[in-house]
């Protein structure tokens, strides 16, 4: 092969390699940004719920239904469910005592401890 052919092949390999690298970086940045946006939305939802229940749980004698209703206010589309001793409303896990009094709240990523 002549020097020109070797040079052109080296340039071609270099061009294809750099384009593949840029494509990978762009795809990786897009995926990272998508995960960051999803995390931000979940955190924002949990914060809105926590702020919504604060005035309710600050009052003495707040009932379970009042607290759950307050936690649903930021997004009425959330259906609460019970799992492992917590009432889950979106990103917030609410624990109530035997008498229905509020005991504690945990974020969705925390593992409940009995």
Image (tube, rainbow, N blue to C red):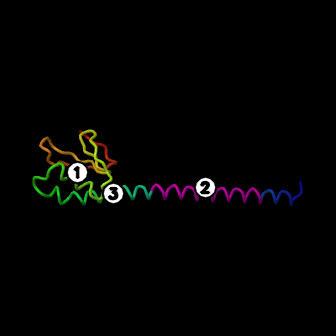
Secondary element under disc 3, as helix, strand or loop, is: helix
Question: In this rendering, which labeled residue sits more in front, label 3 or label 2?
Answer: 3
Answer whether residue 103 is magenta in the image. no
Left or right of 3 on screen, residue 75: left
The residue at which mark 1 appears reads as 68
Task: Identify residue for label 3.
Answer: 45
Mark 2: few/some/many CA within 10 Å (<14, 14-19, 20+): few
Task: Tell me the residue at 33%/53% (across/down).
Answer: 77
Callout 1: SS: helix
Q: Residue at x 34, y 48 (%)?
A: 109
Q: Quadrant of residue 47?
A: bottom left
Residue 50 screen position, x and y as percent:
26, 57
The boundaries of the magenta stretch are 11-35
User: Residue 24's mark?
Assistant: 2
Image quarter where the C terminus lies is: top left
Residue 66 on image: x %, y %: 18, 53
């Amino acid at each position: 092969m002549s020097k020109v052919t070797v040079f052109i092949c080296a340039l071609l390999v270099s061009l294809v390699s750099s384009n593949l690298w840029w494509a990978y970086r762009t795809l990786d940045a897009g995926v990272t940004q998508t995960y960051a946006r999803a995390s931000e939305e979940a955190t924002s939802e949990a914060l809105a719920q926590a702020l919504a229940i604060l005035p309710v749980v600050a009052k003495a004698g707040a009932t379970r239904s009042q607290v759950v209703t307050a936690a649903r206010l930021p997004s009425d589309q959330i259906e609460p469910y019970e799992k492992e001793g917590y009432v889950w409303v979106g990103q917030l896990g609410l624990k109530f005592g035997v008498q229905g009094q509020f005991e504690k709240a945990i974020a969705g990523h925390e593992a409940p401890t009995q």
